[in-house]
Image (cartoon, rainbow, N blue to C red):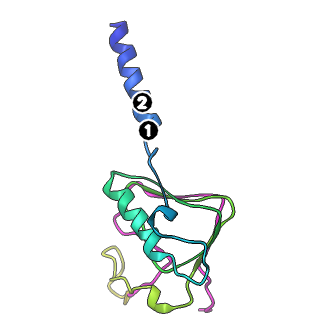
Amino acid sequence: MKTYFLFICAICCYLTGNAHSTEYNIFQFGASKDTSVVQTQAINSAIENCYRQGGGKVIIPSGIYKSGTIFLKDNVELHLESGAYLYASDNYDDFPVQPQASYRSQKDAGGWVSLIYAVDAKNISITGKGTIDGKLTQTF
């Protein structure tokens, strides 16, 4: 009985210790620190790869990154390291209009754009000490 209990404890510790242990650095997917380049494709590729592998952590390292819409998916942690600065592109074409979500009122016309977007995604998070700047310049 004692051996069985220790085996179960060891398995639980292994699984807990390896949950989200897989990391995907955006540089592995073509990102660069060139602020004239929009990094959306590299970030979304890292997220897609992370999602297809069952989840993990997508790392945005220290540096300045311009992006369009980032689509979060199930079991993905978007982690901005200290000194990472993610900001919204000034080009509206980098933000595809998203359809009206089913939970929204039918009186709400829909057609949203955002820097970070997720619908029906489970177990997602945004962590770290970096900065996200949506660059809201309009007043409502």
- Name the kind of residue labelled 1 in the image: Asn
Chain part drawn in magenta: 111-140
Q: Compared to 126, does 31 lie above or below?
A: below
Q: List the residue tagged with mark 2.
A: 14
Observer-nearest of 129 and 44 = 44
Task: Return the x and y of residue 46 as percentages of the image width and height.
Answer: 42, 63
Q: Where is residue 63 drawn, in percent x and y?
A: 65, 68
Left or right position of 117 against 60: left
Q: Nearer the viewer, residue 28 or 111?
A: 28
Q: Residue furthest top?
A: 1
Whether residue 76 is in magenta: the answer is no
- Where's residue 25, x and y in %? 50, 59
Taking depth in this image into account, of 33 and 115 the one nearest to the observer is 33
SS for dot 1: helix
Dot label at residue 102: none
**Which secondary structure is most common in the magenta stretch?**
loop
Badge 2, how many Cα within 10 Å: few under 14, some, many 20+? few
Instruction: Tell me the distance, in whole angstroms, between the alpha carbons under discs 1 and 2.
Output: 6 Å
- Above-or-below relation of 55 to 11: below
Up/down of 118 relative to 105, above or below: above
Residue 112 magenta-drawn?
yes
Which residue bears the numbered disc 1? 18
Residue positioned 30% across, 75% down in the render? 102
Which quadrant of the structure image shows residue 106? Answer: bottom left
Quadrant containing the C terminus in the rendered view: bottom right
Label 2 near label 1: C-beta < 8 Å?
yes
SS category of the residue bearing label 2: helix
The three-letter code of the residue at mark 2 reads Tyr
Q: Residue at x 52, y 81 (%)?
A: 38
For the point 69% across and 63% down, the residue is 83
Q: Position of residue 76 (x, y in %)?
A: 42, 57
